[in-house]
Amino acid sequence: MYNYPQTYSFERIIAWQKTHSFVLYVYEVTKLFPSDERFGLTSQFRRAAISIEANIAEGYKRLGQQDKLRFMNIAQGSLEECRDYIILSRDLRYIGMEQYKQLHTKIEEASKLLNAYCYGIANNHAMNDLDK
């Protein structure tokens, strides 16, 4: 019988978990946006949010450090894009102050964890098994 090494999934990455929670909340909040924003801000916000978690997931199984960091950098860019959409949604009064605070808290948490994950990759502490 072969004894294959255990494989792990991106779902174990805490930054991905927090980002996934953020994406679900973005979908919940954007359901309430005006219908004329369906192909505008609603779509852009959702796509940027999805991009964060998708790039973390895709980068997770990349073998080289630089390749992993490239995907994490794309995720960070999408995260900042979402941060802008949060402010814009508040200023356009599409979301209330409570929703703004929750979105802001969730994105801050995801940002800190993603930055820490990137730091770990850059310093060879996080390849495919950071969360063992």
Image: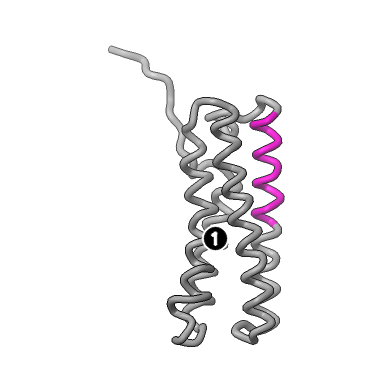
Specify the farthest residue to the front.
Answer: 40
Specify the farthest residue to the left.
Answer: 1
Q: 21 or 84: nearer the eye?
A: 84
Q: Residue at x 62, y 57 (%)?
A: 79
The answer to whether residue 112 is above or below residue 87 is above
Query: How many marks do you count on the picture?
Result: 1
Q: Quadrant of the N terminus?
A: top left
Q: Which residues are magenta?
A: 109-122
Residue 83 at what x, y percent from top left?
A: 66, 65
Q: Is residue 110 magenta?
A: yes
Q: Which residue is mark 1?
A: 21
The answer to whether residue 31 is above or below residue 59 is below
Q: Main secondary structure of the magenta part?
A: helix
Residue 59 at what x, y percent from top left?
A: 51, 38
Residue 6 at what x, y percent from top left?
A: 43, 25
Q: Secondary structure at mark 1?
A: helix
Residue 19 at what x, y percent from top left?
A: 57, 55
Name the residue type under label 1.
Answer: Ser
Task: Please name the colour scheme applied to the rendered image.
Answer: one colour
